[in-house]
Structures are given as structure tokens and as C-alpha cells.
Image (cartoon, rainbow, N blue to C red):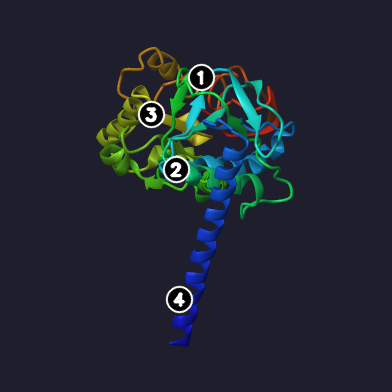
Amino acid sequence: MKNNLSLKFITCAISVLLLLNINAIRSEYISSSEDKSINCYGFVLPLPKYKNISKTPELQYNFMNLINDLLRMNISVYWSFSKLTLETKEIDQDNSPVIKDFELGTFLVPFTGIKDIDTLISVIIYDYNNSHEIFQDDIKDIEIYFLMQPLSIENLYLLTEPKLAYFYSGGVTIGSLNWYITPLSKAGFLNNDFFNENDIISKLNNKDFNVILWPGGSFIEYLTSGIGVIKRFQFLSTIKDWVRNSGGFIGSCLGAYVVSSGMKFLPLNLILYKFPSLPSLYFMRMQDCLISQGFFTFMNISIQDRNHPVTIGVDNIIYNSQFRFGHVS
């Protein structure tokens, strides 16, 4: 009984402290806005950039958790696919608003005009900017600006909470799967599901999922998995249709290899690649394969399309990238 009472007391105390914290930030935010006559329309969040590419994932976890937390709370978050010039003001600074240029990939969080929702937005963003529980010494305060002009949604994309489908079958190894799950979960991507071939055929659709992820694994096990020819046709055709209908696909090693035309030195693969609409048995032929599978090395990767959503914020060249029996789609 005492343990139950203690637990209830602790829960109640935490709830009270949370409410006091929210009200304190709310009062501070509202009073500062009124006292300084800040005509603020929301927040601008530039995508963090770091010179050392090997540390970029660790340093961006805090930022991506912020974005995902906002989306989980059904707060509107926009992403810019063009450069922006906005009137802004640095958060927690007394300087006057200035016109500032922002790069592709900038996030914008507009106020709604509803006091409780706008207060929640401010609480979440202030929390990450100053004292979030995952804050570490090597993660700097997130660069945040007040938006000092009405938001135009031109060249902006309204985000939704991402829903990920991991393919875990057909030779995929648990180690390769963890290479995806560990960093993505640390970045706040928590709405996940795990599919085998049958699940892909029956459940994968563009309404319920945004991205399918196919990690690396054994190509031999993939070739010899006993799902049958007809079902394999259905399985690969479902993924091809998914991508054609704007579904996202991320694959590495085996997961990238099966999307390609297959090994270049096989004449049949060279012929089939010219006819991507034909049914696929092993290779989906959605992209050309410029290098054959079968060796391990390190290489430098040059980013060719800097405007692609996946490469925004990444350096021009990724040095000493591991190439292990396959490439990346």
C-alpha cells in the first residue's frame, strides 16, 4: 500500500512540476511578446550543418528529435525546398529583426493563433533549445529564429509524422537491420513496422507508410528464399509500384543491389534493364548498376545532386565510406 501511495505521490508531483514549467514558459513567452511588441508568426529552424561528416549524425539527433516531437503532437511543420529570405529575430536576443537568407532544407513552424497550441509549440522549442533531457555537451543549442513576417507556403512542403516499413526477410541480417534502427530511433523516428514478403504484398501502401527500408544481407539467401516464383513477382512488383506512386525507398548493400539492374556482366540483365515494365524475378531494374557486387573497400563518394532532400546538409564529398558487397540506393 505504501509503495502504491508513494508512486501516486511521485506521479502527482511530476505532473504538477510539468504544469508549472509549462505555465512559467508560457508566461515568459507571452509577457516578452507583449512587453517588446514582438509581432511573431512562428519559428524558423535551419538544418544544422557540420564540417566533420563523421560527427554529423550524432550532432543532428537533437534537431531531428525536435522535428519529430512536433509532428507527433500534430503541430504543422513545413520544409523548404528552395532558398528563403525572411525577416527574423534571433531567439532569446534583444537585437532588432533583420532580413536573413536561409538554405534549402530549412524548417518553419508557424503559430496557429490558438493560444494553447502556440504555447505548446513554444514550450517544446524552448525546451530543446535550452535544457532538453537528451542534451549533451557535444550537441550545441539548436539555431532558432523568430519568424517576423506572415508565412507564405509557396515552395514549402507540409510534413507528416514519418511511418517507416523495415523489410526484414529474404536474407536480411539482424546486424544490418540494427544499422538502420539504432540511428533512426535515436533521431526520433519511432513509428515503425517490420515486413516480410507477404506483408509487403498485403500491407504496403502509400497512405499508411512513407518509406520502406531494405538493409543489407546475404544475396545467396535472398536468391534461395522459398517464397515461390509467383509470389516473388508480386513482392517486387508491389515495391516498384510503391516507388512509382511516390513512396520512399532506402536500401543499402543487398537492399540497393536488388533495386538495380543486377550484375553488369550478365547479358540477360543488360537486356532486361531496357524493359523495366517487365515482371521482376530478382532485380527490380529501377536503376543502372555501375559496379559489380563482390568486394570490400573504402571509397570517397561525391554528391552529385546537392538539392536532393537526402543530401541537403551533407558535405560535397563523403570521405572513406565503407563499400561492402553492394552500393546504396
Above or below: residue 170 compared with residue 288: below
How many numbered marks does the figure carry? 4
Amino acid carrying mark 1 in the image: Lys
Q: Is residue 304 above or below residue 235?
A: above
Which of discs 1 and 2 lies nearer the camera? The answer is: 2
Residue at image coords 53%, 34%: 252
The answer to whether residue 141 is visible is yes
Q: Amino acid at mark 2?
A: Lys
Could you say which is closer to the camera, residue 124 or residue 241?
Answer: 124
Say which element carries label 2: helix
Tell me the residue that label 4 is attached to.
8
Q: Which residue is located at x 71 percent, y 35 percent?
A: 94
Who comes first in sequence, dot 1 or dot 3? 3
Q: Give SS at disc 1.
A: loop
> Which quarter of the picture shows residue 171?
top left
Label whose residue precedes the other's in the sequence (1 or 2)? 2
Query: Where does the image place residue 31, in percent across and percent down from the top left?
Result: 58, 44
Q: Which residue is denoted by mark 1 in the rendering? A: 264
Q: Are marks 1 and 2 in contact (CB under 8 Å)?
A: no
Q: Tell me the CA gap for discs 1 and 3.
A: 27 Å
Earlier sequence position, callout 4 versus callout 3? 4
> Which numbered circle lies on residue 247?
3
Along the viewing direction, whichever of 127 and 263 lies nearer the viewer:
127
Q: How far apart, in angstroms, are the residues tagged by discs 4 and 2?
A: 31 Å
Tell whether 170 sits left or right of 180: left
Q: Position of residue 227 (x, y in %)?
A: 30, 42
Q: Name the disc covering residue 115, or none.
A: 2
